[in-house]
Image (cartoon, grey):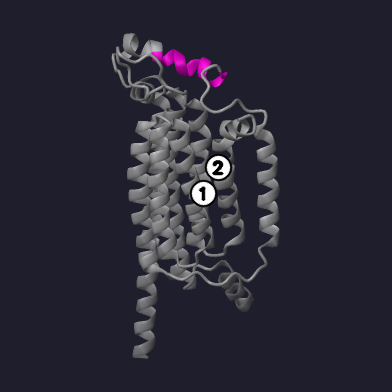
Amino acid sequence: METFINMVLLTLLAVITIGVVRLRNLFAVIILGGIYSFLMASVLIVLDAVDVAMTEASVGAGISTVLMLTVLYMTRVEEAKPVHSPMLPLFVAGVTGAVLVYGTWGLPAFGLADTPLNNHVGMTYMDLSIPDTGIPNVVTSVLASYRGFDTLGETTVVFTAGIGVLLLLRRGVSVARLRRKQQEEESKS
Amino acid sequence: MEVIQPILAHFNHWITIFLLVAGLYVVVARGNMIKKLIGLSLFQTSVYLLYISPGKIFGGTAPIIDDKIEVYSNPLPHVLILTAIVVGVATLALGLGLVVRINEVYGTIEEDEIFTQEDDEE
């Protein structure tokens, strides 16, 4: 039953992806992107990643969609018709996909407990979490305690990106003001 | 049943690869910059699936420890992907900031139109 729900949700995800690739109205594409994120969150719940599902639903479907709609408001809604033939990108994507699919034959099957991934450090955290930190949610204890430096690095990345966006947009404001001033002077003279 | 078995075993991988290839195609083939960023997000979300699906164990539950439960899925990929999602939205915001700036300077967000404008200036 788990596998069945998983497969249905993943198939829906693939269908939405085809829509995202083919549509040229960017508003529709962004809304489809929101649906895609919620579907992805459902898939993640089926895969037992509840914390990730919550983050994906709030960040992927919430913040990303709002950011994209804001930028869309400042620019154009309709995407221009492609000038170049899509054959070369299609070929590159097809070859990449074929190589990756060939690679999946060497990977362990879905849902098994005796794979290398599920017998190393990840499962050690399950045993150590309560005695070491006293937190029952192991994802939280790993994120905030065992791998706390990762989270510090993540915060640094977000901080840097925030500074970058601020600098970009503030310069934009000053350039726009400069241009307006030039236009006013030209209209006076 | 023998025919279905490998499909069941690798269905997650194949959908992951499909999403990844779709994202790659959009990034390479489309000239619109917002569309390119959407393609980049598609690529990113496929990586979430790539990490999370091998950590799933049949009959397991979310890794929150309780006396009544014996089988849990692997928590480590979840932690890594939590970090990746937040970093992903940070890069998306920076990219969208760049798109806004490009739109202010060139008046368009289509790659081809920007190239023709630059050719005209030369």
* Figure quadrant of residue A97: top right
Indicate the amino acid at tag 2: Ile
Answer left or right for A88 relative to A78.
right
Q: Which residue lies under the disc numbered 1? A: A14
Which chain is mark 1 on? A
Answer left or right for A89 relative to A184.
right
Residue B99 in percent (x, y) is at 46, 61
Q: Is the residue under label 1 in contact with that under label 2 (CB below 8 Å)?
A: yes
In the image, residue A118 above or below residue A73: above
Q: Quadrant of the N terminus of chain B?
A: top right
Residue B114 in percent (x, y) is at 56, 70
In the image, residue A116 above or below residue B8: above
Q: Is residue A17 magenta?
A: no
Q: Are there few (<14), some (14-19), or many (20+) residues within 10 Å of tag 1?
A: some
Q: How far apart in space, not on screen, are marks 2 and 1 (Cα)?
A: 7 Å
What residue is rendered at 42% in x and 22% in y? B59
Q: Quadrant of the C terminus of chain B?
A: bottom right
Is residue A154 or residue A39 the one in the foreground?
A: A39
* Residue range highlighted in magenta: A115-126
Report whether residue B97 is seen.
no
Q: Which residue lies under the disc numbered 2? A: B15
Give the overall secondary structure of the magenta segment: helix
Indicate the amino acid at tag 1: Ala
In the image, residue A46 above or below residue A144: below
* Helix, strand or loop at mark 2: helix
What residue is rendered at 38% in x and 34% in y? A45
What residue is rendered at 49% in x and 71% in y? B108
Q: Are there few (<14), some (14-19), or many (20+) residues within 10 Å of tag 2?
A: many
What residue is rendered at 43% in x and 57% in y? B96
